[in-house]
Image (cartoon, rainbow, N blue to C red):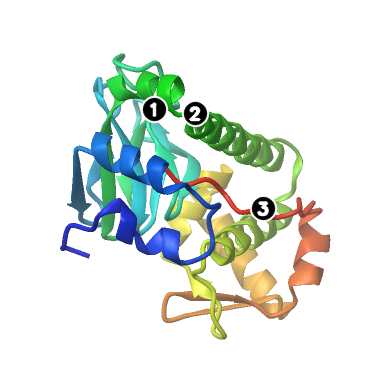
Amino acid sequence: MNQQISCTDCPLRKSGAFSATSAEEIEFIQSIRQRQMQVRAGHGIMREGDASSTLYTLLSGWAFRYRTLNDGRRQIFNFLLPGDFIGLQHQLGQASPHGVEALTDATLCAFPNERLWDIYRSHPGLGFDITWLCAHEELIVDENLLSVGRRSATERIAMLLIHLYKRAESVGLGGPDGVPFPLIQQHIADALGLSLVHTNKTLKRLQAMGLYTLGNGRLKLTHPAAMARLADYYAMPLRARPLI
């Protein structure tokens, strides 16, 4: 996606996966958008320790938010999908304790963080949307913490697979052959606090149980109800998400 796309013609808004936004609100979002940018897979969107003056909406592609220890060990906090709002997880204008990396080639819309206050002042409905998005991400991080703290390796991986499957479906990425799944086993291990060997064995065990198939970069849950029971997954009612 190399061409510049106006907010009015945003393919995410046309997908029906997100809540409605008024023409006035879309015009305001367009007025504060700095640019549309492309980031190649494996490249940084935000770097650990850098002070960023920019907020982003992920227009296409996948990314992840992470933190690295001094010895190189990495913890992935969250995977980011189209429509996710990036940059509010640290104090604005301060050095970021975490980084954000593109998992696939990605397109992002960039906004100056100093205009955040204008959103709350002139369009409180959009301000509420940003608050909702932050609360929603906190719920995701809480679920990840529950997995790392209390679930077994099998339950953790089952939870991650069904969680990402549901999220990808909710933004219109699903199809008869499942959803895109660009993660490699190292990403799964880093997200769930598992060794690469344990991750590999557990994925093979779940596949042998007939719970999922993975091929050509697509994940398909063949028995989603069984996967949900195994993961002790609580499916919250889906609602259309805000899009900034």
Q: Nearer the viewer, residue 238 or 31?
A: 31
Q: Closer to us: mark 2 or mark 3?
A: 2
**Residue 105 image point, x, y percent:** 26, 60
Q: Is residue 86 left or right of residue 110?
A: right
- Can residue 85 be seen here? yes
Answer few, some or many: residues within 10 Å of disc 3's Cα (few below 14, many 20 plus, some between 14 and 19). few
Which residue corresponds to mark 3? Answer: 239
Which residue corresponds to mark 2? Answer: 127
Q: Is residue 177 left or right of residue 149?
A: left
The image quadrant that residue 73 belongs to is top left
Label disc, if present, on residue 69 of the rendered structure: 1
**Residue 9 image point, x, y percent:** 31, 61
Amino acid type indicated by mark 3: Arg
Q: Residue at x 38, y 28 (%)?
A: 98
- Tell me whether the residue at label 3 lies in contact with that at label 1, contact meaning CB atoms closer than 8 angstroms: no
Give the CA separation, mark 2 to mark 3. Answer: 18 Å
The image quadrant that residue 118 belongs to is top left
Amino acid type indicated by mark 2: Gly
Q: Residue furthest bottom?
A: 176
Give the CA separation, mark 1 to mark 2. Answer: 34 Å
Image quarter hosting the N terminus: bottom left
Amino acid type indicated by mark 1: Leu
